[in-house]
Amino acid sequence: MAPIVLADEFVKQTKDWNRKKVLVNISSGAAKILIMAGQPIAVLRRGWKCLHGVAGLEQDKMSFPTSLISFSPGVMDTEMQGTIRSADERDFADRDKFHEYKEKGILRSPEFVADKLLQLLEAEDLENGKFYDIKNLL
């Protein structure tokens, strides 16, 4: 609930600012695909995707809109990946898929992903409310 309140307050406090304003929800593939044992995160990610989409449409009608976008960084080499790979298969049925990501070397570094996000934010043609996937920015 706190991210919703913070986003709403940011939009209210900056509604008269005539400059580029962007709120980015760092999402994941869980917003688009179902992952076994990933119900809580999938619900949150899908909810944020929907919220940013609707809020983005509303903001487009404002004099000085705030852009609200979702960004999926794809699979990254993070501590969470390590935790998933070390999980018991009974607790995380898709665990082997995460081992495969590591073995095939398809995990992206956080630095690479951050660079792609910065490039996206510097673009002049951000579509308000859009879900951006790093795969489409490569």
Image (cartoon, grey):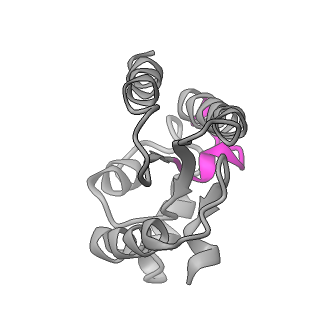
Q: How many marks?
A: 0
The kind of secondary structure the magenta stretch mainly shows is loop
- Looking at the image, which residue is at 55% across and 27% down? 40
Q: Where is residue 100 shown, x and y percent of the image?
A: 52, 71
Q: Nearer the viewer, residue 63 or 5?
A: 63
Instruction: Tell me if residue 30 comes above or below residue 74 in the rendering.
Output: above
Instruction: Tell me if residue 91 comes above or below residue 9 in the rendering.
Output: below
Q: Residue 47: which quarter of the image?
A: top right
Instruction: Tell me if residue 92 comes above or below residue 109 in the rendering.
Output: above
Q: Which quarter of the figure is the N terminus placed in? A: top left
Q: Nearer the viewer, residue 2 or 56?
A: 56
Q: Does 34 appear in magenta? A: yes
- The residues colored magenta run 27-39
Q: Which quarter of the figure is the C terminus placed in? A: bottom right
Q: Nearer the viewer, residue 30 or 51?
A: 51
- Looking at the image, which residue is at 55% across and 44% down? 68
Q: Where is residue 123 shown, x and y percent of the image?
A: 51, 73
Q: Where is residue 132 shown, x and y percent of the image?
A: 61, 61
- Looking at the image, which residue is at 43% across and 47% down? 18
